[in-house]
Image (cartoon, helix red, strand yellow):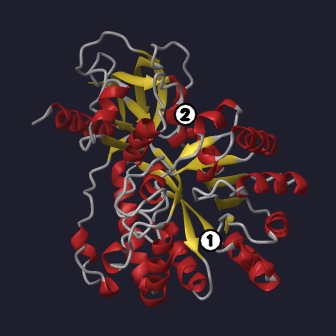
Amino acid sequence: MTAQLVLREQLADGARMSRYALRNVRLNSAVTNWSAMDAAGFFLADLTVEHGRILATTPARSEPTETSDNGLFSIDAGGRVALPTFVDCHTHLDKGHILPRTPAANGTFDGALAATRADRTANWSAGDVFKRMDFALRSAFHHGTSAIRTHIDSQPPQDAISWPVFTELRQHWHGRIDLQASCLFPIDMARDDAFLDGMARRVAAGGGTLGAVAYPAPDIDHLLDRMFAAAARTGLDLDFHADETSDPTANALRRIAEAKLRASFAGKVLVGHCCSLAVQDQAIVDATLDTVATASLAVVALPTCNLYLQDRRNDATPRWRGVTLLHEMKKRGIPVALASDNTRDPFHSYGDLDMLDTFRLGTRVLHLDHPSGDWIRAVTTTPAEVMGIGAKGGIAEGQPADFILYEGRSWSEVLSRAESNRIVIRNGTPISTLLPSYAELDGLEGLTLG
């Protein structure tokens, strides 16, 4: 039996006793209330877990890894890193795993739009959407995600199919994954009063956020004003797709910030992608980001999908990374996050809702290292705050004992391997799930082996 399996068994034993101490675990100051640390932000600590919650976090002390005199079951983590469970604030669960039945997908944005539209029209029944979304959620839970926001394609008649499915899944997954949904439709549909008001009511009833794809429509400012007004009337936050292009004239991010300021909107606003910033002149970038900071927008980068789609050159090598300017945003105090985005669909052919994979790729592509700083917040505490679930994404006394214990003892070790042996702890107990088999999706509304 490997050391990691032994550790898992010990944690399960401790959970059955309802109280245990996890000794010599390496925590990170960015996601805990701790100040003493090494250059990478780590410190050795002892966690005491009682009845599924973190009772105490204390400096590590030398102690035998046996049951102590006072009856506290003691487990030696051997300096392994423990991080909070992940918060994934931008996904598309309703699109996930349709790639095998979209053979026309060619890795381009336009091709993805057309292939997804055709598949949605032909196949997205309630049963199809439920099974694919549940498959994705089981994968995310296994990998250590505890909260997800998904966009829901909401052009009629799909809204009447997918939103009830989401509501059912949210209840089904209650207590394991906190689920939020954001409607998604082309922003020009906001011209229609009946559609916009009805969609806002549907989203409000589902506890979601109002969202749209903000692309360069002739009346984009007017449409954004309508979106902000609808959100204010119904008490909703907003979530936009913006500037997912290499066109340097794309400036929806700035226009969203200006619209929020015009509306004096008090809710939260998250904007995803914002790729065009990376190809704009510096003066334009500075003006845009200053406005975004003033408007208190949050931005989420999607490195897996944006690397896959952006600057695809028909058998030629791409010349830019496709991702947005997170360092420049963060220096201005703009909250920034990373998220999974699409998985195994025409917008991104790969992925498994594994946020460690997303963070590992983001670290390499966006240079979130040397120093690593507090970038781990981009997949934990920051998206939790954006989603209004601030208790998630951290490790703190009094909170549920939800964390992930890795084999690695440093950032280099954690981010160099897939960490498939990671131990996901929920309410103090290691989960024992298996990844769902792709064979479960065989034959689903024409789905075939891809």
Vertical placement of residue 84 versus 370, above or below: below
The location of residue 93, given as percent across then percent down, is 46, 67
The location of residue 136, given as percent across then percent down, is 38, 64
The residue labelled by disc 1 is 184
Determine the residue positioned at 34% across, 61% down.
315
Indicate left or right for 380 with 191 as reference: left
The residue labelled by disc 2 is 398
Locate the C terminus and report the quarter of the image it occupies: bottom left
Q: Depth check: 129 or 284 in front? A: 284
Indicate left or right for 302 with 276 as reference: left
Q: Depth check: 438 or 323 in front? A: 323
Vertical placement of residue 108 versus 195, above or below: above
Amino acid type of the residue tagged 1 in the rendering: Leu
Q: Give neighbour class at mark 1: few <14, some 14-19, many 20+ (Cα, 10 Å).
A: many
Amino acid type of the residue tagged 2 in the rendering: Gly
Determine the residue positioned at 34% across, 34% down.
415
Q: Quadrant of residue 48?
A: top left
- Callout 1 secondary element: strand
Indicate left or right for 440 with 117 as reference: left
The location of residue 144, given as percent across then percent down, is 39, 47
Determine the residue positioned at 46% across, 27% down.
369
